[in-house]
Each structure stands twice: as structure tokens, then as C-alpha cells.
Image (spheres, rainbow, N blue to C red):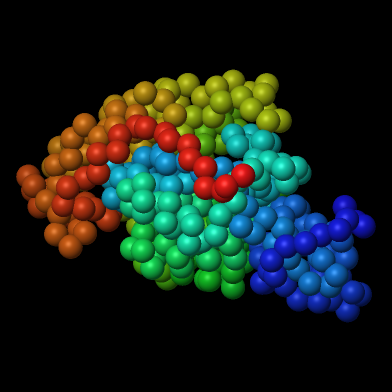
Amino acid sequence: MTGEALSGAPARYWHPLADGRLQCDLCPRECRLRDGQRGFCFVRANAGGRLVLTTDGRSSGFCIDPIEKKPLNHFHPGTSVLSFGTAGCNLGCKFCQNWDISTSREMDRLADEASGEQIARAASGNGCASVAYTYNDPVIFAEYALDVARACRARGLNNVAVTAGYVNPEARNDFFAGMDAANVDLKAFDDDFYRRVTGGRLAPVLDTLTYLRHETHVWLEVTTLLIPGHNDSDDELRAQASWMVRELGPDVPLHFSAFHPDHRMRHVPRTPASTLMRAREIALAAGLRYVYTGNVHDRRGGTTFCPGCARPLIERDWYALLRFDLDVTDGRGRCPHCATEIAGVFETEPGDFGPRRIPIRLSAR
């Protein structure tokens, strides 16, 4: 798209090219943009020789959710999180479950707006423990997200990124320095799948995962949406789990979630619950200690078991906590039966928000 009148907040992570274009350095796409042209994500654009973020301060909506919905099962269980996103995405997943937001080319979808201080104040005032940057990928609105994150930290709130992890190192370092927890969508464990189905590559995502695990203090969990016939073979699941054990360690929780037909993959059937249960068993057998199922009713697949004595410690029914049986000291949990440490960030008493979902408006209009 060229010739469009563009405006927005100054963006970072770009440099000029000799031919007059600007190269966006935020993510591995490294879009090269002429004046008036938008990047693949649609929200970063060349406006008169400078890169701008066109969605700064604007959102597709705000909602208070349980933290387990992100999904994060080992980060302040039972607490509430104020969730928001903007529009656009730097991947083009054919199966996108939020495609109306991630592929939006209508800025009118951004019906709400708020400054970082307004968001932090709303989260605090509604009793939330955290703010989540989600719905579309927050790395594409990194500057806005970090403005919000600073305001949230000033009020003692946690910052949570729900992301595909498709980001270059410089922006990645800045972005995750503002985050306290992240759930990274690992779309598949196959580069050909990434090329064909997401328009991206696998290697940068694996690099983000190892970076988060070994070079930051960000609490990390991983989600893989299982799509029948595309990324759910025993061999691929075993390879993914084995890589996680080897490169991330056995304590990073892995969530397998169910696909439903959507966007450009409406011809693919819904994921059976049996596929998620099979994937969970494969990942546990490979050595991961905390493996969960999502988007299906599976009490066992939602429960945190002690890797030492196998007792159920945190039982969940969908997003409701039914049991919380941990000894917690300074945010660290232990099994009260065998003293095995349970990886995560915990409070002495869990939250009691439950499975509610509460949409809120922040703007005056």
C-alpha cells in the first residue's frame, strides 16, 4: 500500500537504505518500505522517511481474564489479568484463531484507547495482579507495550506477553526486559510447516525460547495448537518435547491446545480430545514434568502433579482452581508431601478470580 497518509508514534528498530527505503528491524521479516508503505504486520509504516507505529495508544478491546487463560498455570495461579491487544500480526497463520484482529486492515477495529497510566490504573483498580499483551502479537506494538509495562511496574503489576516469539534480538532484548512472564506459541516443530502455514521460520522462535529460558528472569510457558494431520504426529511431538527437555530443561510447562476450524483452514476438522491426551503422554514420557491440555474439558490434563511423588497439587476445572496444595516461601513452591520443588511463581494463597471473563472500556468515547 503506497500513497496513504500515515501518522503514528515514532517507532524504533529501523534504519534507512541507500535507495531511500526504510528497513524495519523489529522482526525477521525485515520489511523494506517506501514512503507511505506499511509492513507485513500493517501497523509499522514509513511516514515521510521515518518509521511510525500507527496503533500506538489504541486497542481492539480490554478484558479481565483468569491468568490460566493465557495460558499460564505456574504464574500466580487463580489471579486475574487485564488483557488487551491492537491489530495486525507479523505472521500469517492460516489457522489463526484470532484472525479478525490479527489480519485486520481496518483501524476502526481499534475501538478503545488508553495511555499506559490509564491501563495500569484500570488493572490495579479492578484487582488484577497482571496486565497481558495478547490477542495479536505484542512484539509488533513493542513501543506501546513497553510504555504500558513501565506504568504497570510502577504500580506493582506484572507484565505478561502472549507471543509467537518472532522477533529480532535487539527488539527482543528490550521487549522482554519489560515482561515478567511469557507464553510463547510454538506453532509446530517443523520449519516446512512454518514456511507453508505461518509464512515464517522456525529457527528464530527456537532462538527466542532459549534466550528467554537462559538469559532472562521471565517466567516461560509454551503452547502448541495441535492441528489434525499437520503438526500432531508422534514423531514431531516427541522431537519437540525432547528438544524442550534438552534446550530449555524439564521444568518449562507445555500446553497442547485444540484447534477449531477457522480462517483459511475451515476444511480441517476440530482436534479430538484424544489427540491432546496422546500428545501429553508423549511429552511426559520424553521428560517434561508439566504438560497440560487446553480448549477441552480434561481435569487430569489441567492438573499440576508433583514430579516427585505424583500427587495432584493444583487441580483445575477449565479455568477454575479446585485445589491448591503447595508450601510457598518467597514465591517458590514445594510439594507438602515430599518437598519436591515445583517450578513457577506462586503466592502463599492462590487467587480466587475463577473462570470469569469481564470486558471493560477505558476510553471516554
Residue 223 percent location from the top left of the image: 46, 43
Task: Answer yes or no: is residue 283 visible.
Answer: no
Q: Is residue 43 depicted above or below 194 in this figure?
A: below
Residue 62 percent location from the top left of the image: 51, 44
Q: Residue furthest front?
A: 364
Q: Looking at the rendering, in which quadrant would you find the C terminus?
A: top right
Q: Quadrant of residue 23?
A: bottom right
Residue found 70% across the figure and 62% down from its top? 53
Residue found 29% across the figure and 28% down from its top? 317
Residue 206 percent location from the top left of the image: 53, 57
Q: Quadrant of residue 11?
A: bottom right
Q: How many marks?
A: 0
Q: Quadrant of residue 331?
A: bottom left
Residue found 46% across the figure and 34% down from its top? 257
Q: Is residue 214 depicted above or below 355 in this figure?
A: below
Residue found 38% across the figure and 68% down from its top? 154
Q: Nearer the viewer, residue 47 or 19?
A: 47
Residue 161 percent location from the top left of the image: 48, 54
Q: Residue furthest left?
A: 337
Q: Nearer the viewer, residue 31 or 35?
A: 35
Is 345 positioned to the left or the right of 276 in the image? left
